[in-house]
Image (tube, rainbow, N blue to C red):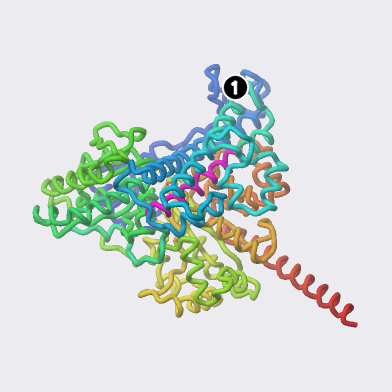
Amino acid sequence: MSIQTEQTDKFRTVDPAAYEMLELASTNGIQTAWDRYKAQQPQCKFGNTGVCCRICIQGPCRIIPSKPGQDKGICGANVYTIVARNLVRYIAGGASAHSDHGREIAYTLLHTAEGHAPDYKITDTDKLVKVAKRIGVQTEGISINDIAKAVAIKALEDFGKYDSKPCTWLESTIDDERKQKFKQTAITPTAIDRSIAQLMHQTHMGNDADPVNIIFGGLKAALADYVGMSLATDLTDILFGTPAPIITEANLGVLDQEKINIAVHGHNPLLSQMVVFAARELDAEAKAVGAKGINLVGICCTGNEVLMREGVPTATNFGSQELAIMTGVLDAMIMDVQCISPGVKDICNCFHTVLVTTSHIAKIPGSYHIEFNEATAMEDARKIVRLAIKQYGTRKAELVKIPQFKKQVVGGFSFEALMNLFAKINPESPISVLTDAILAGEIKGVCAFVGCNNQKTTHDNNTLTIARELAKKDVFLVSTGCAAGAFAKAGYLSEEGVEAYAGPGLKKFIKRLEEKSGLNAGLPLIFHMGSCVDNSRVATLWTEMARELKVSLPQLPFVASAPEAMSEKAISIGAWIISMGIPTHVGVIPPIEGSDLVYGITTQIARDVFGGYFIFEKDPMKASEVLFEKLEKRAWKLKINRETAKKYNSELSKAYEG
Ligand code: XCC
Ligand code: SF4
């Protein structure tokens, strides 16, 4: 029997499919992350508030500020030093994960251009040329392969170049005001790897004890994270195409009992994209074993990547990854890197599902390992798909239970796709379709939903609640990552969401676009911009908006929310978003409450210096109010400033006329 009680069952998830699977888990005594979360209670208070230092092996030092003698670590480190160090080390972890993913994409682009990665090709040459021009790579009279090679090398230089110039993917994508700000505060990264290594050095035992300086070091690594994400998005688009609107479905109901079901899980599309091709190619082999074909589904961000470009349906998001296996019809789960809970292996043991690891840096004992190599990409992908085909025959009919929940998803809104949509109303200046709606008060601003699920919150609940509340108040919403997964499963990425939750202004705005969209489906309530690395697309959106409105980012009615943040990557993303001047809500309190000073730096000092800051709020209703208030205030100031400027200008011109 499971250790869950009925009381907690109610608050475990708001996703009906996940709920059904959790009930099944309870009945069958299958342990899930929800059980393990409960078993971990109460969680260590020292760890939870960030006051446990394990940076050297004299420790762990656990700080009790009110207790003389125990108010400092053995080395004399103050509580604010310890909390700050712990916090920024998350950023180092997050930045390393995102950027290493970006590095692999850059190598693949390089090798594709050189002819050493025969299964890949340069798909979006327009974007290649656009990126090349933006970063100062010669394009006139140069072959596509040579341009691609030069772009890939520029990207790789951003990881380890030895000069002290800003990283290219920072310098070429942000506005001048932010460049100045980052320069003044000495947080401009010059190389990704260097910023991460420096941060690890800065926070080594006996080094930096100044919490403000430590946090600024963290922000520098966070901007390096941005660089890694930004180049990952660009180069992935070049290799596999820039996403355009696409119609698909989401939630466990997308699994098909009559087909061979394969889930791609993780982040890096270098493999999952090849699995898409291999699955199409081997459909006949699937039919030969009695299945009706191959049904590929996605989990987490690699799922988002193939949703955005290929319309692969989303099975589920991070929090409920184990539950996909419990349907009994998942023949293989293929993982690349990041956010794969090792717990999936235990569930696979109860079913016929084969777990396939593919990266030399992400193995799980007991699972199949088919090492994925760029040079043999298609062959590796075929091997994996064939394994799933073989596994199909071992399915246990009595264990099959697919929750009948799925929703339509209209996704694929890269920045370019959004602009193409806006261009149908205003071809000269697409972005002004959005900014004009804000100035007119039809739309109250923009909120970007990012990040994960976290067992500390009810699965998907924070994310859905805040979005609903903001939609009702006419806020334009975009999303990435597992937040987008939550919206997909709940029908917020389709017309259904607009009908249910859009306020009058937002609805009018979306319907106006819809009339011209030329899509076979209504537009969604929330625009899915991609995986977590694609938060770079969100950054492009706010940069363009600010440029159009002629304001700096701290004046722009734009906020972000990570309602159920979990990973180090989420902390890193949050940190660069605030450094860009965007107020960012986080619905789970990170371990910083042990130091009022550090808490204050992230919420107050950050605001004074960068204009962006963290808002920590666990209650989703309160969070939505605070976020809306921030938007209103910025929108109001924007309007006042413009009216004053207009009045001043017209008075001035009148004076001249007179
Ligand atoms: Fe991971 Fe990106 Fe978080 Fe989902 S949202 S749990 S990081 S998969 Ni980025
Ligand atoms: Fe303790 Fe200082 Fe070592 Fe941290 S660095 S574990 S506070 S002695």
Residue type marked 1 = Met
Whether residue 127 is visible to the viewer of this picture, yes or no, is yes
Q: Residue furthest bottom?
A: 658
- The verdict on label 1 being within 8 Å of ligand 2 is yes
Q: Tag 1, which secondary structure?
A: loop
Answer above or below: position of 389 versus 425. Answer: above
Residue 609 in magenta?
Answer: no
Q: Residue at x 28, y 47 (%)?
A: 26
| Label 1 Cα crowd, 10 Å radius (few <14 / some 14-19 / many 20+) | some
For the N terminus, give its image quadrant.
top left
Q: Main secondary structure of the magenta part?
A: helix
Q: Is residue 238 magenta?
A: yes
- In this rendering, position of residue 601 left or right of residue 354: right
Q: Is residue 414 above or below residue 197?
A: below
**Residue 201, x across and y down, in percent:** 58, 26
Question: Could you tell me which residue is drawn at 59 percent across and 47 percent down?
Answer: 170
Q: Closer to the camera, 212 or 117?
A: 117
Pointer 1 residue: 205
Residue drawn 24% across and 32% down? 366
Residue 475, horizontal then vertical, whole percent? 56, 67
Determine whether, in the image, residue 289 is placed left or right of residue 225: left
Percent coordinates x, y for residue 112 in the rendering: 36, 45
Closest to the observer, 383 or 322: 383
Q: Nearer the viewer, residue 302 or 284?
A: 284
The residue stretch that appears in magenta? 220-240
Q: Residue furthest top?
A: 58
Looking at the figure, which quarter contains the C terminus?
bottom right
